[in-house]
Amino acid sequence: MTCREYLRRRRSFTHPGADSWPQDLTEHLSGCRDCARLEDCLGSIEPEDIDLREVEGRVETLISKDLTPVTPLPPARQRTMRFALLSIVVVAVIVRGMGAHGWERMSFVQAYVTLGVLAVMLLLAVSGISAQMVPGARQKLSPLWLFALCLSSLPLLGLLLYPFSHDSKFAFNALRCWAIGTACALSVVPFLWFLLRRGFPLAPPLHFATAGLLAGINGLAVLELHCPIMDGLHKAVGHGAVALTAALAGWAIASMRKQVLSARETSKP
Amino acid sequence: MESPPNRDQPGTAPDLEFLMSRYQDGDLGAASALIRLVSPPLYRFLAADRTSRQDVEDMLQEAWLQVHKARHTWRPGEPLLPWLYAIARHVKVDSYRKRQRISGRERPVEFLPELVATSAGSPQGLHDFETMVASLPVGQKEVVTMLKVTGMSVEEVARATASTAGAVKLKAHRAYEKLRRLLAPPERSDHKNGGSK
C-alpha cells in the first residue's frame, strides 16, 4: 500500500485504536515513518484541564431564567407534507375561483408533463425549506442545485413544449401574468410564516429566499393552470419570472433585516 | 471518542441524547450536566482559530444561548452532535464576521489579550495537533477538528457543516496530505507523496 492509498482510505476512519480500523492500514503504519508521524500528530490531542466553570455558571444562570418544557418540532416528513398540502390547497382554491382555462387548452402531453414538473419543483422546495428549519439537518439537495432546478425547469419546459407565436401584446400580457402570479405568491406568505415560525434557520437569507421560491412556485402553478396563452416565450418569461422575483424578494427582505439587526447591535454601548 | 454509549449500560458515560431530551423537558440538572460534558470539546472547536481566550469564551456562551433558543428543533432519536455543532459553527462564523467588521476601528494596545494556550505537557519536539491544524485552510481545519476533537463520524460532520460526506472526506484527505508534508523532516520535504511503505 502506498502512502497516497493510505491517506485516501484513512479519511473514512477516526483513529488507529478504533474497532473498525482495518488491519492493512495498521500494517502500513508499522512500516511507514511519515504516516506514523501524521498519526502521532492527529493523536496528540490530550484532554486539557480547561477551567470553564465561570462560563458554564453564567450559561446555567441565563438559561434557568426561562427553562420551560418545549415540544420538539414534528418529524421532517410531517413538516414536508404540511408544506406540500398547504401549496396544493392554496393553488386549488385560487384556480377554482379564477378558472382552469390553461389546463383546458393544454394537450395531454403538455398537461401531464407540466403537472409532473410542477410536482417535482414543489417537492424539492418543500424538502429544502423543511430541512432548513433544523440546524444540522440532512439536506438532500444543495441550495445551488435547488434554485437552479426550480428556476430553470418551467421556463425550459415552456420553450420546449409550447409553440412560439407572435404576440403584439407580449410585454403587456407577460407583465399581467407576472402581477397575477406574484399576487398569488403573496397570498401564501402568511400561511408559510405560520408553518415556519418555529424553525431555527442558520442562514436566514437562504431560508427567506427558499420561502420566496416556494411561494413563487405556488404562483407559477396558478398561472400554468389558469393562463390560456399557450405561447412558449410567454410562459418562459411571464410565468417563469414569478418564482425568480419571489425568491429574490425573500432574500432581499432577509438581507435588509440582517443589516438592521447588525446596525442595532454595533450601535449598542 | 466513538458515539456516546447507551444509557442502559451500567457504568458508562451519560448519554448526551438522553440529557438533551431531559433538557427539553425543562430539567435544569440535565441541562447543567450536558453543558459541563460538551463545553470542553466545544471550547476546543471554537478555539481552533487561535482567537483570544475572551472571544472564545464569549462564543461558547453565545453558542449555548443559541442552543437554548433552538432546543425545540432537536428531535429525540436524531444524533445530537451534528445539531449542536451546526449551531456552534454558525456562532463561530458570525463572530468572525463581526470581528472583521469592527477590526477597522481597533487601535494598538500595550498588552496583548491572552491567547488560547496550546496543549500543556506535550513532549518536546512532538508536533501538537492545534499547532499543525492552525496552518490548514479554514474548511479543512474545521473538518479535521470536528473529526478529531469531537469524535463525530464523517456523516455527522457533513450534517454539521451542511455539506456532503464526499466533500468532508475530500477535505479531510487534503488536510492529512498537507499535515503529512508539514511533518516530514526537512531533508525529505521535497517529496510530495511517499510512494512506498
Image (tube, coloured by chain):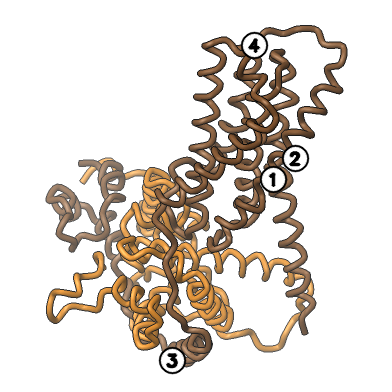
Q: CA distance from mark 4 to mark 2?
A: 25 Å
Amino acid type, residue under disc 4 in the picture: Tyr
For residue B131, which quarter of the picture? bottom left
Tell me the number on the disc at residue A187: 1
Q: Chain of mark 1?
A: A
Q: Are marks 4 and 2 on the same chain?
A: yes
Task: Give the chain coloured orange.
Answer: B
Q: Chain of mark 4?
A: A
Q: State which mark lies toward you, 3 or 4.
A: 4
Q: State which mark lies toward you, 1 or 3.
A: 1
Left or right of A42 on screen, residue A146: right
The residue that label 3 is drawn on is A53
Left or right of A174 on screen, residue A54: left
The residue that label 4 is drawn on is A162
- Counting residues from the N terminus, which is met first, the one under dot 2 or under dot 3? 3
Q: CA distance from mark 1 to mark 3?
A: 51 Å
Tell me the number on the disc at residue A183: 2
Q: Which residue: 27% across, 61% down?
A: A39
Query: Are the residues flagged by discs 1 and 2 in contact, CB closer than 8 Å?
Result: yes
- Counting residues from the N terminus, which is met first, the one under dot 3 or under dot 4? 3
Amino acid type, residue under disc 2 in the picture: Ala
